[in-house]
Amino acid sequence: MVTGCGGFLGSEIVRQLLDRGDQVTGISRQEYPDLVRRGMHHRCGDLRDPEFVSRSIRECDSVVHTAAVAGVWGSWEHFYSINKIATDHVLTACQSNEVSQCVFTSSPSVTFDGDHQRGVDETAPYANHWMCHYPHTKAMAEQAVLKAHTPGSLATLALRPHLIWGDEDPHILPRMLDRARAGRLRIVGDGNNVVDTVHVVNAAAAHLDAIDALASTPETCGGQAYFIAQDEPVQCWDWIRQICELGSAPPPTKRISYRAAYRIGALLEVGYRLTGRRAEPPMTRFVAAQLARDHYFSIESAKEKLGFHVRLSMDQGLERLGKAWKERR
């Protein structure tokens, strides 16, 4: 069972599972006929409905829970209900239906409090303050998943893929290009910060590795979180310039200091809340910190305990991205 089966990551996980011969059932709130044609069984519904979740998970051996609401803006209730409550429903359904494995898609942002993260591993603590609801609710959900790990019954673990990208990305890369074309993309900070990314092919493969590891060695890999990345940290703004060039968008040249961007983000957050605006502000404190700070991670634990390895290198991913975008033009 793959929740969020129609999402950017979820759909790639489904495709990889089908390609290796697994029987896959997907859960989502919309229809995805292309995945059904490839062989996926589909359950259309809302994970906030515990009865629907329990019915859907019956007879499954493993659950990959990717469904979530991402972003830096929105109400606490919205993020909490989908990221935390829905996860609780998935865990309860796994336990009551004797599902043996549950892999949860988390985020490195659960450890991010605005400071640099340089080569950190899974010993890094959860953040002690939160700049938006997404990492906060994901941290709560991750902790629930890891606590549910029960050797001999339900084996669980959490993956933290960082900055997932690829040629079918409907979120990060298109927004980046739109801003660049509109002249609204600014280099935040000194432009030398180093970040990790992960191509969607590698992020999805890590989930298959996790399923297999939980089935074979749950006593050594279960109950833990794992950073997942490309294993090739890059200078953030050099990488963004490469993406802009591949997308035929002008790369950013104008700059703004981190302090100024952070202050503007804070003021916009206050203003948007006071006026009740639902649209995401053009800058927030979290976005400013993400664009200006180092955040790259050790993935040695995932290599050692899950057998994770990179299938598609950075150069291969960029070549694939450029080719796909060129064919669409």
Image (cartoon, grey):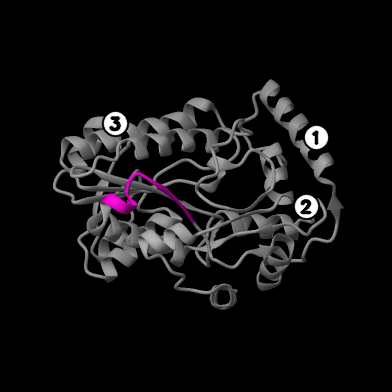
Q: Which badge, 1 or 3, is on the more N-terminal residue?
A: 3
Q: Which badge, 2 or 1, is on the more N-terminal residue?
A: 2
Q: Label 3 belongs to which residue? A: 49
Q: Label 1 belongs to which residue? A: 263
The stretch drawn in magenta includes residue 98 = no
Residue 213 sits in which quadrant?
Answer: bottom left
Q: Secondary structure at mark 2?
A: loop
Q: Secondary structure at mark 3?
A: loop
User: Dot 1 surroundings within 10 Å: few (below 14), some, or many (20 or more)?
Assistant: some
Q: Label 2 belongs to which residue? A: 184
Disc 2 + disc 3, Cβ < 8 Å: no
Percent across and percent down for residue 292 are 74, 50
Percent across and percent down for residue 110 are 53, 40
Of badges 2 and 1, the one in the foreground is 1
Residue 305 sits in which quadrant?
Answer: bottom left
Query: Magenta segment range?
Result: 219-227
User: Dot 3 surroundings within 10 Å: few (below 14), some, or many (20 or more)?
Assistant: few
Residue drawn at x 23%, y 59% as measured from the top left: 216
Of badges 1 and 3, the one in the foreground is 1
Residue drawn at x 54%, y 39% as measured from the top left: 125
